[in-house]
Image: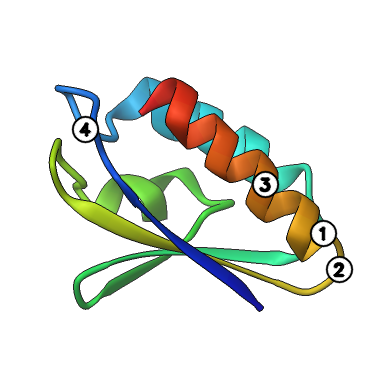
Amino acid sequence: MITFTYTITDASGIHARPAGLLVKQAAGFPCAITLQKGEKTADAKRIFAVMSLAAKQGETITVSCDGEDEGEAAKALEAFLAENL
């Protein structure tokens, strides 16, 4: 399992558009990908789960990738978050 943290920099946080793009990015990998903010955990391949985190600017999320291609998935998601959130 590979885990990393990311602090949201986008002024709007994770709203509908970037959440949809994040889900699309995560769905391209066979491994399990989860997001965690505080006590809440969400499957990164499900848009309503990602939106339910209600992550806002300045908050930190933890991304975990577990399974086949986890290293590739972690790198891709880290780059995606840096560019979009």
Residue 57's place in the image compared with 54, above or below, is: above
Residue found 15% across the figure and 22% down from its top: 11
Which residue corresponds to mark 3?
75
Secondary element at image label 3: helix
Closer to the chain start, of discs 2 and 4, is: 4
* Distance from Cα at disc 1 to Cα at disc 4: 26 Å
Q: How are the residues colored?
A: rainbow
Closer to the chain start, of discs 2 and 3, is: 2
Query: Mark 2, mark 3: which one is toward the viewer?
Result: 3
Q: What mark, if any, has residue 68 been given in the picture?
A: 2
Locate residue 1, reporting x and y percent: 66, 78
Which residue corresponds to mark 1?
30
Q: What mark, if any, has residue 13 been given in the picture?
A: 4
Residue found 21% across the figure and 32% down from its top: 13
* Distance from Cα at disc 1 to Cα at disc 3: 14 Å
- Left or right, 3 with reference to 12: right
Secondary element at image label 1: loop
